[in-house]
Image (cartoon, rainbow, N blue to C red):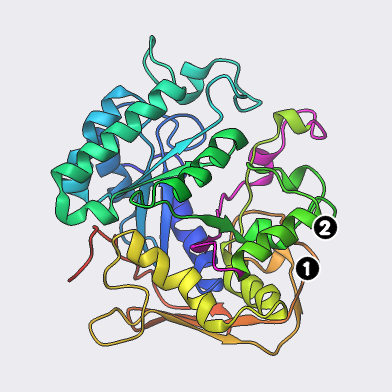
Amino acid sequence: MPPIDGTEQDAGTESRACAQGGVTTALNYMRTGQYYLNRGGDYADVFPEVLSATEGKSYVDYAYHLAPMMRRHIEEIPALVRDHGVTSFKVFMFYGSHGLHGRSTDQNSFLMIPEGERYDYAHFEFVMRGIQAAREQFPDLADEISLSLHCETAEIMDAALRMAQAFPHIRFRREVTVGHLLADIDTASGIGGKVNPPLRPREDVEALWEHVLAGEVDWVVSDHACCRDEQKFGDPREDVFVAKSGFGGAEYLLAGLITEGTRRGLPLGEIAKLTAWNPATRFGLRTKGAIEAGFDADFALVDADTEWTVRAADSESTQEYTPFEGFAMTAAVTDTFVRGHRVLDTGKVVGDPIGRYQKRPTGA
């Protein structure tokens, strides 16, 4: 099958950036609509093409989060779980009346959903009902079937976190991105740092670290959203409202977390949980997340006593800039192994792509 948009190329280049960051398995977000596949339709038609386009291109193992964008996608959830091993799904919280992307004034055209449907709070509730129905249909997988909420709408996220305390039987989990732990509005100021949710002042960054140190964050992610210069910036270039949200960061995940975490007293064992064991357990990667018999030989070697400066030019990503430009790091990933295969050797990506699609749950 022909590649879909830039998916095939991204599988190669951005998985190389993952290897730089010590990432051995990438869980990639995917949806229909503009800026992703640039097409609509059923996942029964689209997702096999995605799998075909990316097969044999990735340097690390990979799986997908899918977003149910329309009514038909919700109906497809059981088939995606059963036939394709997709056990994690995602909803955004800003497409309805809370601010479309700046380059789109028409929701249905932007999201490529049928006329008469809306991506709004009612759709959000129907997605939640669809996820719960799948958990009941596949009880052995219930703890590994999940719905992620992308937290643009602060009121809903605040309510969800409060619900986590009031309803302990609901398995709420909390994640934070390495970008929000590293950068603030001063160190990564400018349109290149536009992201959802937005970067915040330094006091908010330190508040996030307090929650990490208190064990109130379950995993740290890269939220790697590679935006080439021509995709990131609009016309005029200085107009923040026409700039695309998101930036890459997988290549700085482990180095950044160790640099800033150890400085604040975060043990390396906790970093391993935050980046490996916890997400692997939650997302059905049963052969990932630990170094022991029966698990894949996935691990990264880190020099925790070296100083270097972030430069976008040194990244394997096709993104030509980074909001982390000039950041001082005190740890560096030197080697990355995926199922025993060395994919990063003394800081350089090596060999052919050996990444495999992870049909979840993986292994026993």
Give the quarter of the figure containing the N terminus: top left
Which residue in the structure is indicated by mark 1?
327
Question: If you read the primary sequence from the N terminus, does the residue marked by circle 2 or circle 1 appear first?
Answer: 2
Where is residue 344? Give x, y as percent: 50, 79
For the residue carrying disc 2, how many other residues have a C-alpha within 10 Å: few (<14), some (14-19), or many (20+)?
A: some
* Label 2: which secondary element: loop
Which of 144/54 is in front? Answer: 144
Q: Residue at x 74, y 69 (%)?
A: 310
The rendered magenta stretch, by its main secondary structure, is classed as: loop
Estimate the spatial distance between the alpha carbons at disc 2 and disc 1, rounded to whole Å.
Answer: 9 Å
**Residue 37, quarter of the rendered image:** top left
Type of the residue with mark 2: Thr
For the residue carrying disc 1, how many other residues have a C-alpha within 10 Å: few (<14), some (14-19), or many (20+)?
A: some
The residue segment tinted magenta is: 214-239
Q: Residue at x 69, y 54 (%)?
A: 320
**Residue 290, quarter of the rendered image:** bottom left
Q: Magenta includes 221?
A: yes
Q: Residue at x 30, y 23 (%)?
A: 71
Question: Is residue 148 visible in this depiction of the protein?
Answer: yes
Would residue 360 be found to the left or right of residue 165 on screen?
Answer: left
Where is residue 317? Give x, y as percent: 59, 60
Where is residue 247? Give x, y as percent: 64, 50
Question: Is residue 1 visible in this depiction of the protein?
Answer: no
Q: Which mark is residue 187?
A: 2
Type of the residue with mark 1: Phe
Q: Magenta includes 101?
A: no
Q: Is residue 19 above or below residue 149?
A: below
Would residue 32 be found to the left or right of residue 357 on screen?
Answer: right
Please, which residue is most extreme toward the top here? 116
